[in-house]
Structures are given as C-alpha cells and as structure tokens.
Amino acid sequence: MNAPWLEAPWRTATQRLLAGRVPHAMLVSGPPDLGKRDFARRYAQRLLCQQASGEAEACGACRSCALWAAGSHPDFTTVTFGERDDGKLRSEITVEQIRALGSRLAMTSQFGGWQVAIIEPAEAMNTSASNALLKTLEEPSRNTLMILVSDAPARLSATIRSRCQALDIRFPARGDALAWLEGQGAPADQASFALTLRAGHPTLALASLTPEGEARTRVVLEDLERLAAGRARAPALVQGWLDDQPIERVAILSELLRVLARAVLGEHRDVPAALLRLSRLLPPGELPKLWRAWEGSVRVRAELSGPLRADLVLSELLFGVADLWSVPHAGG
Ligand SMILES: [Zn+2]
C-alpha cells in the first residue's frame, strides 16, 4: 500500500487478527480522502484470503482472492446508498438494508471462514437502521465482521460507537507527508506549500499539485499580493475569477487567508515566504478583520453555486480582502 499513514493502522488490524481478537464490528474513521474505504476493503480481502499469513496483504492468487477480484465473493458484501424506485440514489442507509445484512450474516459462510460486510458511509444509517444494527451486534454470529467506515463518526449513535473497535486513520506527521509527496514526484518546495495550504492533508495536497492546480494557486496568490499592494483593485479582478473556476479560486483564497491568520498569530513554521511577507504588511490589530474576510470566503464559496449574483458576492469578498491592507487615514 502506497500510503504510509495506513501502515500503523494495518499493523494494528492484522495483529488483532493474529491474536484472534477480531471484533464483530470495527469503526474505521478519520478525515475524508485518506483511503479509509480502500483500507477496509484490503482488510476484508485479507480476512477472506485462504493463504495470507502474518501482517501480509491478501495473496491475490487463491480461489477466494480470485472471487474477490471478480467482485463476486459470496462472503463479502457492502452496504451503501441504495437506489430509490425512480433510479436515484438514496441519501441514507435504510433499516431494510441493515435487516437484510443481518439475515445474510446469520447464514453460514460459503467458504467456511469469515463473513465480512462494509457499511459506508456508516453515519448515513438512519435511526431505525442504527437500531437494527445494534440488534445484530447484540447477537453476533461467529466469524463475522462488520466494518463501519465514516468521515463523521460523531454522527453515529454513542451506543454504536461503543460497540465497535475503533481504528482511527490520521494525517501523517508533516515530514512523512512531505516524503510521501516527494515520492509521488512533487518538488520539495511545491510539496511544502501545498501541504501547508491543505492543512497537512496529504492526498488533497497531491491533488492540488497538478500543473493546472498549481497555476490556479499561483494566480490566486499573485492576485492577493496585488490587492495587498494596491496594484490591483477588486472590481478589475472579478471577471477573471468568474471566467476560470471561481469556486476553486475562492477555496484557495480561503486557505491562504487561514495560513495568513496563523502567521499573524506568530505561527511562522511552514508558512510560505510570500504569505509571511503579506502578514508583515498587515496593519497591526487587523486579526478580527482577517477572520471576517476568511469567514466571507467560506460563505462566498457556498454562495457561488447559489442564486445570488456571482459578480456581486465575489466583488464584495475581494473588496474586503483588499481592505485588510488599506492604511487608515490620518485622523480617520
Ligand atoms: Zn488469497
């Protein structure tokens, strides 16, 4: 697996298996886009594999692994959003789905080994579904494992959480994340900047490091510098932003303002030089205004896909940003 932050959780999970301490339910939780679902699937395949041993991955060659690869392993199932009658996806996991899962797990495994189910996203279970799951957990069948996968475990009921063995997937330490990004081909300075902007999230940082993503970040940063120096006025920038992925640009602006606020608060570690310069140019006492601008950027990001006039909301945002660096008039 090419994600070092999953190695420790993998060791934990496989050691539980080797020690015969696999629970009936496991909750794999953590921020989005860190590979939780893949992790759950790898672990499921490992449990079902007929040859793997120790901390190794599934062998990929046995009969069970062949069925797995074909997507037709009889002892594995995934519960996720089902289709409604009109063919659209539901927005919740229903009690019928969980009851069907319970009946399935109550039957004997076809291979005489484990039966594994992944419920994902687990927080999408509605109240009746959660209650049905609790029932299943109260009368577990032997050698069954339910893996709940969730970005938002706080939205699961406390009782469900208490019945699951937790496995948290977390961001890697900054040094590990940088090493991983460089291993993916990212130049060190760009990796560092991208990781800071994405608040330490390795895969989001990597996704932003495409030539296109990089160019977008550069444009937003340059516009921010021009606004701060009074070299550009907000209305002049609006059209350019509207013409080229305004929501993505505002998202980048949000991140830049957040890092800028950190720099103003004296947290200078890993802050890119351009943002440090901008933070030093801010008139003293501007932190509340900076937070307001940041809040504005978060709001505008949502508003840009709504009914309001995009040019007006964007213009107001950029005015507010430019205003951060405006020098107060003497006596004003
Ligand atoms: Zn195998």
Image: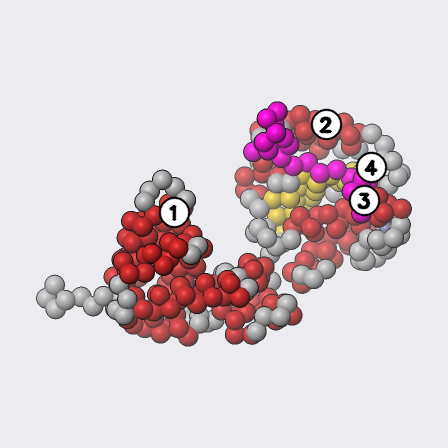
Q: Looking at numbered disc 3 in the image, what kind of residue is underneath it?
A: Ala
Specify which label sits upstream in the sequence, 1 or 3.
3
**Marks 1, 4: nearer the viewer:** 1
Residue 81, above or below 328:
above
For this orientation, the residue located farthest to the left is 331
Q: Looking at numbered disc 4 in the image, what kind of residue is underneath it?
A: Pro
Badge 4 marks a residue whose secondary structure is loop
Q: Which mark is residue 304?
A: 1
Residue 198, above or below 37:
below
**Marks 3, 2: nearer the viewer:** 3
In the image, the segment drawn in magenta is 68-93
In the picture of the structure, the residue carrying the numbered disc 3 is 70
Q: Looking at numbered disc 2 in the image, what kind of residue is underneath it?
A: Ala
**Residue 34 is inside the magenta segment:** no
Location of residue 7 (image quadrant): bottom right
Specify which label sits upstream in the sequence, 2 or 1.
2
Question: Main SS type for the magenta part?
Answer: loop
**Marks 2, 1: nearer the viewer:** 1
Location of residue 119 (image quadrant): top right
Residue 23, above or below 14:
above
Residue 254 can be seen, yes or no: no
Q: CA distance from mark 2 to mark 1?
A: 42 Å
Residue 284, image x, y percentages:
26, 68
Residue 299, image x, y percentages:
37, 48
In the picture of the structure, the residue carrying the numbered disc 4 is 74
Badge 1 marks a residue whose secondary structure is loop
